Structure formats: C-alpha cells, structure tokens
Amino acid sequence: MLKCFRNCLRLSSLSTLPLQYGILFPKLLACLVHLHFGHFSSAVISVTSFYLSMNLDGSAQDPEKREYSSVCVGREDDIKKSETMTAVVHDREVVIFSHKGEYHAMDIRCYHFGGPLHLGDIEDFDGRPCIVCPWHKYKITLATGEGLYQSINPKDPSAKPKWCSKGIKQRIHTVTVDNGNIYVTLSNEPFKCDSDFYATGDFKVIKSSS
C-alpha cells in the first residue's frame, strides 16, 4: 500500500492521481509523504495540495467562491424553538436570529467592543427590530446592521429625543431556507464594517467541539 502511494505521488504520475481519494484521505496522504520522502516532504505535499484543491474535472477551485459559498448551519425547526443560532461559516462566527417569521444573520460580536450579540435581546426602536448588545446596550438593526442612537438638540429644551442612524456598523449576511435547512452566505460587500475587527480568530466565542 505504501509503495502504491509513493508511486502515485511521483511527479510523473501526479496527473493520474485519483482526486477523489485525495479528498477522502488528505491526512493519510500527508502522513505517508512525510514518512517516506524525508526532507522532500514539503515540496511533495505542496504539489499534492495543489491537486487536492482542484475540482474533479481538473479545474482549480476559486478560493473566493469557496469563501462566499452557502453553508448549512442547522434546521429551521431548531432555530424556531430557540430563536437564536450560532455558527462558524468559513471561519467567520455569525449569529442567526429568528424574529417574527424572518431570519437575520450578522457577525456575532458587537461592533462597539466585541460584546456577544447572541446573548442579547431583540427590541423594537423607532419601529425597527434591533439586537441590543448585553455589554453596553448598543442597538443594531437586524435588517441592515445600522447602529441606532437617540439625539437631542441641546439648544432646544423642549425638543424630544430622535432616533438617528450611525450608518452600517455590523456586517449582515444572507440567510436562505431550503427544504427545512438554514443556509448562511457571507457578505461580500467591499465596504468595511466596524464589526470586521472582531470577526477574526482572536475574538472567537464559539467553542470548538474538538
């Protein structure tokens, strides 16, 4: 078996390597290469990884397309019961809310100071449903990710506070439902959101099952 793998990984025979086996057993391949190619292992693994990143028809996969492809995060029945669901989509943590028959997804940490939005409450402000961050009570619209605040004219003592928008602060992602499954597609909007800062691995709040 080892001889078979070694022959398959020779540069002269890489074009005939069955890609489906590489996809099913990538860790086994890496281990065998390391054990039997010595200091040449890094070069062989690099070449092998290139082939493993290709589609079965031989065409290379676009990393950007993989990053923004839809990911199934759970069942519709589950989120209807809990009203909140957390998930990791292409290494980005998101929270999905079920509110009045609609689904909304956004970065899981608040744009202000990284508060855990999945622990917050949904309230209506100025007729707009918002998630309220449990740390500092920042209000974020579910539909657009805008930060809302109340302002008042200090020169007019009789003026009433008005709700205003800071603009889009929290990155919103797309939620779709297919056959009872909930799918999330990450936003690929080119503008920067404040919540992007807390969407890195350093601030992860979802514990790995491993």
Image (tube, rainbow, N blue to C red):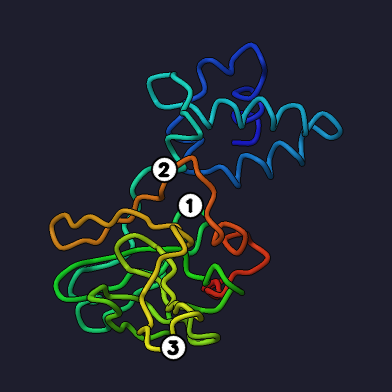
Q: CA distance from mark 3 to mark 2?
A: 50 Å
Label 2 sits on residue = 68
* Frontmost residue, 177 versus 32: 177
Q: Residues within 10 Å of mark 2 (few under 14, many from 20)?
A: some
Q: Residues within 10 Å of mark 3 (few under 14, many from 20)?
A: few
- The mark nearer the N terminus, 3 or 1, is 1
Residue 32 placed where, x, y %? Answer: 68, 40
Mark 3: amino acid: Pro
**6 to the left or right of 126:** right
Q: Residue furthest top?
A: 12
Mark 1: amino acid: His
Q: CA distance from mark 3 to mark 1?
A: 51 Å
Q: Name the residue at 57% across, 72% down.
A: 112
Q: CA distance from mark 1 to mark 2?
A: 8 Å
Find numbered disc 2 in the image and state the secondary structure of the residue it sits on.
Answer: loop
Q: Name the residue at 35% across, 63% down.
A: 105
Label 3 sits on residue = 157
Which mark, residue 90?
Answer: 1
3 vs 2, front mark: 3
Mark 2: amino acid: Tyr
Find numbered disc 1 in the image and state the secondary structure of the residue it sits on.
Answer: loop
Q: Residues within 10 Å of mark 1 (few under 14, many from 20)?
A: some
Residue 37 placed where, x, y %? Answer: 79, 31
Q: Name the residue at 49% across, 40% down.
A: 190
- The mark nearer the N terminus, 3 or 2, is 2
Find numbered disc 3 in the image and state the secondary structure of the residue it sits on.
Answer: loop
Residue 164 occupies quadrant: bottom left
**Marks 1 and 2 close (CB-CB < 8 Å):** yes
Q: Name the residue at 48% across, 61% down.
A: 169
